[in-house]
Amino acid sequence: MADVKTFTSQNWQNEVLDADKPVLVDFWASWCGPCRMIGPVVEELAGDYDGKVIVGKLNVDEQGEIAQKYGIMSIPSLLLFKNGQIKEKTVGFRGKGDLVKIIDSSL
């Protein structure tokens, strides 16, 4: 199973904006119940799309400047980037089927 990446201000440009594959970013926080619920789904997606999509998480408490830049007001928020641009955005808990549709639309 593929690892879920941890995105930070140090690796954001290289790992997300300059990536040669679509990138799914889960904006989350440890105190957020729905974030903990969606965590295992995000991990499954990392395995399912290994080699096709980069999947990672960004802790909004630790990386607030990035969350602010993208207008993250509620978590969990999942943004799908392609070629450095936001292609899809979803807020709140979503089941695996909904997220698969979002990812597949970018492939």
Image: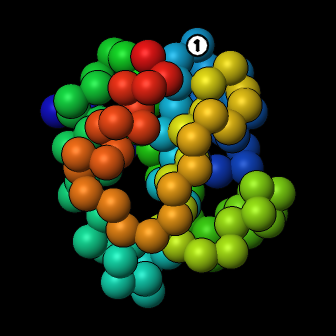
Circle 1 Cα neighbour tier, 10 Å, few/some/many (<14 / 14–19 / ≥20) = some
Q: Where is residue 7 in the image (x, y as percent from the top left)?
A: 57, 47
Q: Where is residue 93 in the image (x, y as percent from the top left)?
A: 36, 68
Q: Position of residue 10 (x, y in %)?
A: 72, 44
Q: What residue type is disc 1 on?
A: Asp
Of 11 and 34, the residue lying toward us: 34
Taking the spot 34% from the left edge, 45% from the top edge, the residue there is 99
Taking the spot 76% from the left edge, 63% from the top edge, the residue there is 71
Q: In the image, is residue 6 above or below residue 106?
A: below
Of 73 and 55, the residue lying toward us: 73
Q: Is residue 55 visible?
A: yes
Which secondary structure lies at badge 1?
loop
Taking the spot 53% from the left edge, 73% from the top edge, the residue there is 75
Q: Where is residue 35 in the image (x, y as percent from the top left)?
A: 38, 72
User: Splitting the image into 4 quarters, where does residue 45 fall?
Assistant: top left
**Color encoding of the figure:** rainbow
Taking the spot 72% from the left edge, 31% from the top edge, the residue there is 85
Q: In this view, does 95 lie to the left or right of 60?
A: left
Q: Quadrant of the C terminus?
A: top left
The residue under label 1 is 20
